Image: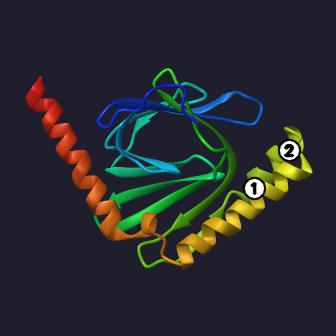
Amino acid sequence: METEELEIGKKYQIHSYKHDSKIHRSWDEAILLDIKDDYLIFGNEKTKVTESDGRTWHTKEPAVLYFFKNQWFNIIGQCKKNGIYYYCNIASPYIIEDGTIKYIDYDLDLRVFPDGSFKVLDRGEYKYHKSIMHYSDDLDMILKSELTTLIELVRNKAPMFSTEMIDKYHHTYDELKHQKAEAN
């Protein structure tokens, strides 16, 4: 759901929340690269990340980010020297408000390696937050089902898990950054 007009090349922020509505993490920059019917594609590189406790750090490599309108996950393709790694968050569908992409992070993550193998991360964190934040049985079922869907996308080599797609959007990101630099 968007509450504002989307614009290719526009800079957005990203805010990740927890189920209790508290901010979890934020990213200073995500440039909109493409608009699809059911998801948006962004790019960033060496962007500042702020943790909920105020600590900051910068991402190390270029990334292509997929945010879905109706799926309970998002996908980050990280362009590392030894291949593309994917970090997938089980998370609510996004909304965009005031130039910020917002979603709720539900702890479970899927790490996908360049060879296509993967590992589910943070099951303990998920159980802990499910208990203290009182995730409903319906929500629990949705999140586990979406994790299964995400794993099937990896196994079936869905487009967002292809090196060619990540390379294409990384190139688009570089072109947009170059155009902005020349305009300034």
| Residue with the most extreme left position | 182
Label 1: which secondary element: helix
Left or right: 49 in relation to 167:
right
Q: Is residue 108 above or below residue 33?
A: below
**In the rendered structure, are the residues bearing label 1 and label 2 in contact, judged by CB atoms less than 8 Å apart?**
yes
Dot 2 amino acid type: Tyr
**Going 62% across and 71% down the picture, which residue do you hit?**
151
Query: Residue 143 bears which disc, if any?
Result: 1
Q: Quadrant of the N terminus?
A: top right
- Please indicate, yes or no, whether residue 53 appears anywhere in the rendered image: yes
Q: Answer with left or right where residue 115 lies relative to residue 124.
A: left
Q: Quadrant of the C terminus?
A: top left
Residue 135 is tagged as 2
Question: Could you say which is closer to the camera, residue 32 or residue 20?
Answer: 32
Gap in Å between the C-alphas at discs 1 and 2? 10 Å
Question: Which residue is found at the position 82% from the left and 49% from the top?
Answer: 139
Residue 120, compared with residue 10, is above or below; it is below
Q: Tell me the tag on residue 168.
A: none
